[in-house]
Amino acid sequence: MPLLQLVIVLVVVGVVLWVINSYIPMQSTIKKILNAVVIIAVIIWLLNVFGLMGDISSIRIGK
């Protein structure tokens, strides 16, 4: 993935998260949970993009 595309994706995710936090009325606890989920998802995606984490499809949850 080219670096420019990576930066564009991160900027778009950040702007969408900012718009949701600024303009959609929610309880602060729900906003904190949403922010945490988005940040964790972006970190996992970045680790996968840079090859620091194995194939995500090989991760199994449950039996």
Image (cartoon, helix red, strand yellow):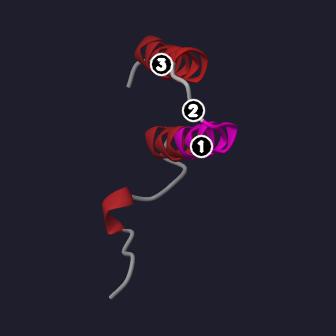
Quadrant of the image containing the N terminus: top left
Badge 2 crowding class, 10 Å Cα cut-off, few under 14, some 14 to 19, many 20 or more, is few
Dot 3 or dot 2: first in sequence order is 3
Q: CA distance from mark 2 to mark 1?
A: 7 Å
Quadrant of the image containing the C terminus: bottom left
In the image as oriented, which residue stretches furthest toward the bottom? 63
User: Callout 1, which amino acid?
Assistant: Ile
Tell me, yes or no, whether the two marked residues, 3 and 1, touch with CB atoms within 8 Å.
Answer: no
Tell me, yes or no, whether the two marked residues, 3 and 2, touch with CB atoms within 8 Å.
Answer: no
Q: Dot 1 lies on which element?
A: helix
User: Callout 3, which amino acid?
Assistant: Val
Residue 43 picture quarter: top right
- How far across and down, in percent of the image, does residue 25 sit? 55, 25
- How far across and down, in percent of the image, does residue 15 sit? 52, 14
Q: Is residue 30 above or below residue 60?
A: above
Q: Dot 2 lies on which element?
A: loop
Badge 3 crowding class, 10 Å Cα cut-off, few under 14, some 14 to 19, many 20 or more, is few
Q: Dot 3 lies on which element?
A: helix
Q: Nearer the viewer, mark 3 or mark 1?
A: 1
Residue 26 numbered mark, or none: 2
Magenta span contains residue 23 = no
Q: Is residue 45 above or below residue 12?
A: below
The residue at 50%/44% (across/down) is 41
The residue at 39%/69% (across/down) is 59
The residue at 46%/46% (across/down) is 48
Tell me, yes or no, whether the two marked residues, 2 and 1, touch with CB atoms within 8 Å.
Answer: yes
Q: Which residue is mark 3?
A: 16
Residue 30 numbered mark, or none: 1
Judge left or right: residue 11 versus residue 62. Answer: right
Magenta part of the chain: 27-38
Dot 3 or dot 1: first in sequence order is 3
